[in-house]
């Protein structure tokens, strides 16, 4: 971990009938951060920026990294239901939630199931809705390294890209990617990366303050999905960050964090 990054703790917690790998940093109100389809990317600069103001909680979903797999979880809505029980067990209520890509979809499903559980919600480059224009990149027909490279507008300009996607990844890194990809495929394959009912249920979020963030040049999830999310979540705000691909939280960490922190405050 780089010296510029804040300290965090990592442990295994027994929660909602399984063992969950959890990382946490900072103090204050809790902010739950849900990772995307390839699992926890490492403790990034944006984690440190948020942990200066919030108690930042970053789990690995069941079946990812060192968290035990739940065989009964067959789709993202199942996973959302499990997470709500986990939050109850952890004594977390009226918290802030933020999800990236598939994690954004997961956050939206959780909010639809229990809107009053959350104080504010941030959806970043979220899957979960079928775009009317363009298509969601097929992560399952492409190698993880190729997917990661396409995720960034210009990987060569991103200092943390080597952490996420090393030129010569270790066997354990490759295995972690493949396990995550298989787990994501199991939950999101049919239909691919969206829930046809979610768009209709998001109207339940009449009072949940929601920020939707997208990169201007997202090659993974079309910006059209962001506009659809905005149109169906009452009072939500869509923020487009220029010169970014699918990972604005990493490509423009300080600008992204400033916008989100302003929204959460």
Image (cartoon, rainbow, N blue to C red):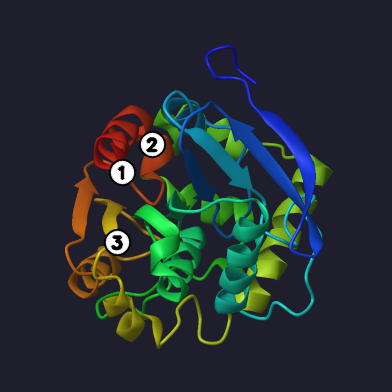
Q: Nearer the viewer, residue 133 or 1?
A: 1
Q: Is residue 154 visible?
A: no
Q: Nearer the viewer, residue 187 or 115?
A: 115
The quadrant where residue 244 appears: top left
The quadrant where residue 237 appears: bottom left
Per the image, label 2 sits on a secondary structure element best described as: helix
Q: Is residue 101 above or below residue 249?
A: below
Question: Circle 3 is placed at which residue position?
Answer: 208
- Mark 1 vs mark 2, CA separation in Å: 6 Å
Residue at 16% over, 63% down: 235
Left or right for 169, reference 96? right
Q: Quadrant of the N terminus?
A: top right
Left or right for 230, reference 4? left
Locate residue 179, reporting x and y percent.
Answer: 75, 61
Locate residue 196, reporting x and y percent.
Answer: 41, 87
Q: Are marks 1 and 2 in contact (CB under 8 Å)?
A: yes
Q: Residues within 10 Å of mark 3 (few under 14, many from 20)?
A: some
Give the numbered dot on residue 251: 2
N-terminal label among 2 and 3: 3
Question: Circle 1 is placed at which residue position?
Answer: 244
N-terminal label among 1 and 2: 1
Circle nearer the viewer, 3 or 1: 3
- Mark 3 vs mark 1, CA separation in Å: 27 Å
């Amino acid at each position: 971990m780089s010296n510029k990054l804040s300290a965090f703790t990592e442990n295994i917690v027994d929660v909602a009938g399984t063992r969950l790998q959890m990382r946490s940093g900072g103090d204050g109100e809790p902010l739950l951060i849900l990772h995307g389809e390839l699992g926890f990317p490492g403790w990034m600069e944006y984690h440190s920026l948020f942990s200066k103001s919030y108690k930042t909680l970053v789990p690995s979903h069941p079946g990812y990294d060192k968290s035990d797999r739940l065989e009964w979880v067959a789709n993202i809505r199942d996973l959302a239901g499990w997470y709500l029980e986990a939050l109850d067990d952890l004594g977390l209520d009226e918290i802030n939630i933020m999800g990236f890509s598939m994690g954004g979809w997961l956050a939206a499903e959780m909010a639809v199931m229990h809107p009053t559980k959350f104080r504010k919600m941030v959806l970043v480059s979220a899957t979960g809705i079928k775009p009317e224009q363009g298509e969601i990149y097929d992560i399952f027909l492409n190698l993880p390294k190729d997917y990661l490279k396409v995720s960034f507008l210009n990987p060569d300009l991103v200092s943390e890209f080597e952490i996420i996607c090393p030129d010569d990844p270790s066997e354990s890194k490759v295995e972690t990617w493949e396990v995550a990809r298989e787990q994501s495929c199991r939950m999101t394959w049919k239909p691919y990366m969206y829930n046809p009912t979610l768009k209709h249920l998001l109207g339940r979020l009449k009072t949940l303050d929601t920020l939707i963030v997208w990169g201007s040049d997202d090659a993974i999830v079309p910006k059209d999905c962001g506009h659809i999310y905005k149109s169906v979540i009452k009072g939500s705000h869509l923020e487009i960050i220029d010169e970014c691909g699918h990972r604005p939280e990493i490509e423009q960490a300080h600008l992204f964090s400033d916008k989100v922190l302003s929204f959460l405050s």
